[in-house]
C-alpha cells in the first residue's frame, strides 16, 4: 500500500488549523477528509502514525488521535492491523500526491496576509515597469502582421524564436531558431521535458535541495529521484557534487540529470568555473542527458560569498570577492550586458536541454519561457505541448520580443534592487536571529537559512496558525531532507520578513527537531 510522508502531508494541510468552526481535532479531520474527497491524496494511502503527524504539525498527539477517530467513525479511515491507518477516498486516485506549491497564490494566503500576517511562501518578484511599457508600445501593425493566419504557432512565433536564439548567440553559444521551443513559462518547459524524456521508473539525478516545481513534475511522471550533493559547510558553497555522480554511474545509468548551476533555487548558489568544468567532464564522460534549468540565472547578483554567516564565531560580515559566481569572471564592467552562459554549451546539443524564461526577470504574469535543444528534441516536446494548449499567446510573445531588447536594462535594475534587499535581509537576521545560519546567495530572491535545533516542518505549521506563511526546507528535497532549513524571500523588501521574524523565532523555540 502507498504511504504518504508526514512532511508532504503537512504541506498539503496548509491553513487547516485556522479555517472552519469547531475544535482543532475537528478541523484536522475535515482537512484530511477534503484531501481525500478531492483526490489530492489517493484512496488507500496509509497515513503517518499519530505521533509522527503530531510532531510535524506541531500539535499534541491527542489532537491527531481524535481526528483519526472522527475520520474512522465517518467511514473515511480504516485501521489495518500491522499497516497503520488507511485513508478512504472518493476522488480521482492517480497515485501522485502534489505538494500544495501554489498555495501562496490562492485566496487563503491573501486573506492571511491582509489580516496582519505575512506571506513568505513565494519568491516571485514584482513586475518591472518595462512590461507595461512594452504592452503600451504594441501597435495594430504588430498584431496585424500575424492576423493573416490562424494564430496557432506551436513552436512559437518566428520573431521570438529568432530573438531567443540571438540571445544565446550574443553570449557566444551558437543557436538557431529551429532549436527553440517557446513555452508558457519555465514550469511548463520542465513539465514537457519530464513527459517527453522520462518513463515511469526511470532514474533521474537531481541536486539536493532543488527546485520543487521540478520535483513535482518528475514525481508526477513516476521518476525514481536520486539526489547527489548536499548543503553543508564542507561543500564549499557549491551545489551538487560531480564526484557523487561518477560514483552513482558505477552502479546505475540515469535517464537524465537535472541541474541549476547558476542562481540555484532555493539556495541562491552559483557554481564557480572549476566546478562547472568538473561537471562538464563528468557529464561528457558518462554521455548523460542533462537538463539545465536557467530560470533564475538572469537574477545573478554578480558576486559570491566565501564566508558563512551566523553562529560560527564570525563577526557577522559576509565575504564577497567581487567576482561572478557563475563563471568566475569579473563582476564589474560588462556583466549586465551579457546573457548567462549555459553549462551545457560545452556538451553535445542532442544530449542536453536548456530551460529559460523571461518571467523571473520581468514579471511572473508574463508567461513566456523556452527550451533550447536539438531540433529533434524540440519537435518531440512541441508535439506534447500542442496536445495541451495548441500554442502560447501570440500577444504575450509580441511583448516578449520587445522585452528581449531591454534585457541589459532589466538585469542592471534587478541586480541593484536584489543586492540592496539581500543586504537588508541579512542585516535584519543578524540583529534579530544571530544564531541562524546562511550562506550569502550569489543570485535569486531569497535566503536559504538554517534554524539550529528546529524542525521547520513543525515551525511552518505553528507559524501558519499565527498568520505567517513560510516554506520549510524539506519541500525542496527529493528525500524530505533539510528539515532545519527555511527559504526566506527578500525580493519584495524586508517588511514582511521583519513582521514575521518574531513569530518565526517563537515557533522555532517550540518546534524542537
Image (cartoon, helix red, strand yellow):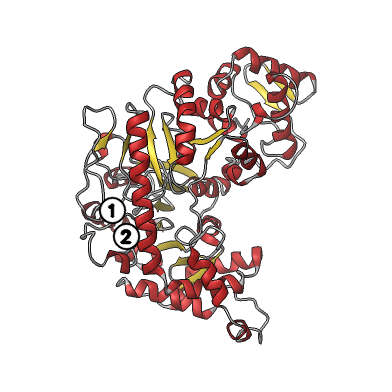
Residue furthest right as drawn: 74
Q: Nearer the viewer, residue 179 or 505?
A: 505
Does residue 501 appear left or right of residue 342 in this picture?
right
Farthest residue, direction top = 62
Residue at horizontal 60%, vertical 17%?
50
Whole-percent x, y for residue 55 in the image:
53, 20
Give the quarter of the figure containing the N terminus: top right
Which residue does the image show at 47% across and 65% down from the upper left? 371
Residue hosting label 2: 343
Q: Nearer the viewer, residue 464 or 351?
A: 464
Q: Nearer the viewer, residue 193 or 7?
A: 7
Q: Quadrant of residue 175?
A: bottom left
Tell me the SS state at disc 2.
helix
**Which of the two discs, 1 and 2, sits closer to the camera?**
2
- Which of 358 and 153 lies nearest the eye of the viewer? 358
Q: Which of the labelled discs sits on residue 165, or is there none?
A: none
| CB within 8 Å, label 1 to label 2 | yes
Q: Which residue is mark 1?
A: 279
The residue under the point 41% across, 29% down is 484
Q: Residues within 10 Å of mark 1 (few under 14, many from 20)?
A: many
Residue 334 in picture, x, y percent from top left: 26, 67
Quadrant occupied by the C terminus = top left
> Residue 299: x and y, percent?
38, 56
Q: Is residue 66 visible?
A: yes
> Which numbered disc, 1 or 2, marks the residue that appears first in the sequence?
1
Amino acid at each position: 500500500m502507498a504511504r504518504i510522508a508526514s512532511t508532504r502531508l503537512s504541506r498539503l494541510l496548509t491553513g487547516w488549523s485556522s479555517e472552519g468552526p469547531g475544535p482543532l481535532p475537528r478541523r484536522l479531520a475535515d482537512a484530511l477528509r477534503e484531501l481525500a474527497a478531492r483526490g489530492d491524496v489517493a484512496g488507500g494511502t496509509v497515513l503517518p502514525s499519530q505521533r509522527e503527524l503530531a510532531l510535524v504539525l506541531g500539535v499534541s498527539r491527542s489532537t491527531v488521535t481524535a481526528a483519526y477517530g472522527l475520520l474512522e467513525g465517518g467511514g473515511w479511515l480504516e485501521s489495518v492491523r500491522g499497516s497503520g491507518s488507511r485513508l478512504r477516498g472518493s476522488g480521482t486516485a492517480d497515485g501522485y500526491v502534489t505538494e500544495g506549491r501554489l498555495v501562496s497564490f490562492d485566496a487563503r494566503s491573501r486573506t492571511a496576509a491582509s489580516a496582519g500576517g505575512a506571506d513568505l511562501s513565494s519568491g516571485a518578484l514584482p513586475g518591472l515597469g518595462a512590461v507595461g511599457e512594452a504592452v503600451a508600445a504594441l501597435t495594430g501593425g504588430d498584431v496585424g502582421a500575424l492576423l493573416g493566419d490562424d494564430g496557432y504557432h506551436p513552436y512559437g512565433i518566428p520573431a521570438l524564436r529568432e530573438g531567443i536564439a540571438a540571445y544565446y548567440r550574443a553570449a557566444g553559444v551558437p543557436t538557431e531558431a529551429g532549436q527553440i521551443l517557446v513555452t508558457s513559462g519555465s514550469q511548463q518547459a520542465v513539465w514537457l521535458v519530464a513527459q517527453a524524456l522520462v518513463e515511469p521508473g526511470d532514474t533521474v539525478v537531481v541536486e539536493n535541495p532543488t527546485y520543487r516545481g521540478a520535483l513535482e513534475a518528475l514525481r508526477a511522471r513516476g521518476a525514481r529521484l536520486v539526489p547527489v550533493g548536499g548543503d553543508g559547510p564542507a561543500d564549499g558553497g557549491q551545489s551538487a557534487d560531480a564526484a557523487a555522480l561518477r560514483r552513482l554511474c558505477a552502479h546505475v545509468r540515469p535517464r537524465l540529470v537535472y541541474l541549476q548551476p547558476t542562481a540555484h533555487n532555493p539556495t541562491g548558489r552559483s557554481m564557480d568555473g572549476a566546478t562547472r568544468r568538473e561537471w562538464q567532464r563528468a557529464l561528457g564522460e558518462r554521455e548523460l542527458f542533462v537538463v539545465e534549468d536557467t530560470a533564475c540565472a538572469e537574477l545573478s547578483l554578480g558576486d559570491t560569498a566565501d564566508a558563512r554567516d551566523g553562529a560560527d564565531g564570525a563577526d557577522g560580515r559576509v565575504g564577497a570577492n567581487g567576482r561572478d559566481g557563475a563563471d568566475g569572471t569579473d563582476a564589474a564592467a560588462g556583466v549586465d550586458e551579457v546573457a548567462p552562459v549555459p553549462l551545457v554549451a560545452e556538451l553535445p546539443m542532442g544530449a542536453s536541454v536548456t530551460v529559460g524564461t523571461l518571467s523571473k526577470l520581468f514579471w511572473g504574469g508574463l508567461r513566456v519561457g523556452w527550451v533550447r535543444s536539438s531540433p529533434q528534441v524540440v519537435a518531440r516536446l512541441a508535439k506534447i505541448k500542442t496536445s495541451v494548449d495548441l500554442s502560447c499567446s501570440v500577444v504575450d510573445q509580441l511583448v516578449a520580443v520587445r522585452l528581449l531588447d531591454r534585457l541589459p536594462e532589466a538585469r542592471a535594475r534587478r541586480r541593484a534592487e536584489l543586492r540592496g534587499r539581500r543586504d537588508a535581509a541579512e542585516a535584519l537576521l543578524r540583529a534579530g536571529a544571530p544564531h541562524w545560519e546562511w550562506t550569502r546567495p550569489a543570485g535569486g530572491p531569497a535566503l536559504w537559512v538554517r534554524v539550529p535545533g528546529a524542525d521547520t516542518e513543525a515551525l511552518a505549521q505553528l507559524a501558519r496558525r499565527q498568520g505567517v506563511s513560510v516554506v520549510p526546507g524539506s519541500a525542496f528535497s527529493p528525500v524530505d531532507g533539510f528539515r532545519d532549513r527555511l527559504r526566506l524571500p527578500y525580493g519584495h523588501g524586508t517588511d514582511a520578513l521583519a513582521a514575521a521574524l518574531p513569530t518565526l523565532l517563537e515557533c522555532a523555540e517550540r518546534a524542537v527537531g
